[in-house]
Amino acid sequence: MPRPRRFRRIFHLPGITYFKPAGVPFRALEEVVITFDELEALRLTYYKGLDQVETAKKMNISQPTLSRLLSSGREKLVKAIIEGKALRIEGGSYKFAP
């Protein structure tokens, strides 16, 4: 039996959780889903400029877990942009910490 997943601490919930390419109707779009914890890892590391050790401590996770979140989040963002897919932000294993 796998170990229960540890909740990742996030500090920012985005006001907008859906992005789509301009000029493409919704019915013609495929979606890529990025989780709130992946987005928070990307935000703290690339937007706020924290290094991976600081980000991992802030999110209450290990550095290897953070590295996996960053890799997965980057892959999803790039896929959505390059392939012209919609991006939905939802889900994940997190707790909001104001």
Image (spheres, helix red, strand yellow):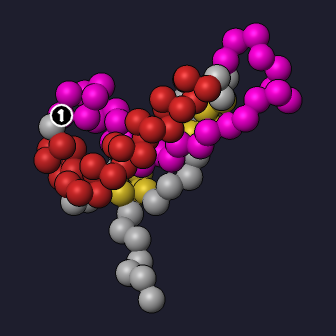
Residue 28 appears in which quarter of the rendering? top right
Q: Which residue is mark 1?
A: 50
Q: Residue at x 46, y 60 (%)?
A: 93
**Looking at the rendering, in which quadrant would you find the C terminus?**
top left
Sort mark 1 into few (<14), some (14-19) or many (20+) by Cα contacts within 10 Å: some
Residue situated in front as seen by the camera: 29 or 39: 29
First to last magenta residue range: 21-50
Q: Residue at x 53, y 42 (%)?
A: 34
Q: x%, y% of residue 5?
A: 40, 71
* Apparent side of residue 5 relative to residue 35 in the rendered image (left or right): left
* Apparent side of residue 76 relative to residue 86 in the rendered image (left or right): left
The answer to whether any part of residue 61 appears in the image is yes
| Residue 55 is inside the magenta segment | no
- Amino acid at the residue labelled 1: Leu
Q: x%, y% of residue 79?
A: 54, 32
| Residue 45 is inside the magenta segment | yes
The answer to whether any part of residue 59 appears in the image is no
Q: x%, y% of residue 71?
A: 36, 44
- Residue placed farthest to the front in the image? 83
